[in-house]
Image: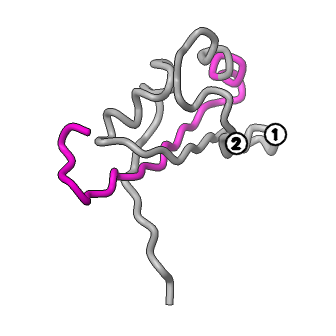
Amino acid sequence: MPGLSVGTVMPTFILAHVHDEAECRVVYAAWRGYDSPLRGLAAMVSCASGDHRMYWTVDADSAHEALRQLPPYLAERTHASEVRKVAIR
C-alpha cells in the first residue's frame, strides 16, 4: 500500500454525513451505479428518527481516500475523522 511502511496499520476513519429530510431520497439514490466497497454493507443511519445522519467506519490511507469510497454527492457533504481505539479506564 502506498505511503505505508511494513508493520504500519492502515488508518481508520469515521465518515459522518448530515442531510435534510428533503435530501434523503437523493442521498440513497446517489449509490445507484457507484462502485464502492461500502455498497451493500450496513451503515449507521438515523433518518428513521428524523435526525438524518449517516456514519461509516472505513480503513484508508488518507481522509481523501476514505471519502472516495462514497458517491461524490455524499463525499462532498461528509466529514472524515481519523480515529483510533483507546481503552477508557
Q: Residue 60: which numbered mark, if any?
A: none
**Looking at the image, residue 57 lies above or below residue 28:** below
- Tell me whether the residue at label 1 lies in contact with that at label 2, contact meaning CB atoms closer than 8 angstroms: yes
Residue under label 2: 45
Q: Residue 53 magenta-drawn?
A: no
Q: Nearer the viewer, residue 84 or 9?
A: 9
Total marks drawn? 2
Q: Position of residue 19 (x, y in %)?
A: 60, 32
**Looking at the image, residue 54 lies above or below residue 39:** below
Q: Residue 48: which numbered mark, if any?
A: 1
In the displayed structure, does residue 11 sit left or right of residue 69? left
Task: Name which residue type carries label 2.
Answer: Val
Task: Name which residue type carries label 1.
Answer: Ala
Residue at image location 46% in from the left, 29% down from the top: 69
Q: Residue furthest front?
A: 6
Q: Residues within 10 Å of mark 2 (few under 14, many from 20)?
A: some
Residue at image location 72% in from the left, 44% down from the top: 46
Q: Nearer the viewer, mark 1 or mark 2?
A: 2
Q: Residue 26 magenta-drawn?
A: yes
Residue at image location 68% in from the left, 29% down from the top: 40
Q: Residues within 10 Å of mark 1 (few under 14, many from 20)?
A: few
| Span of residues in magenta | 1-27
Q: Nearer the viewer, residue 83 or 6?
A: 6
Q: Position of residue 22 (x, y in %)?
A: 70, 22
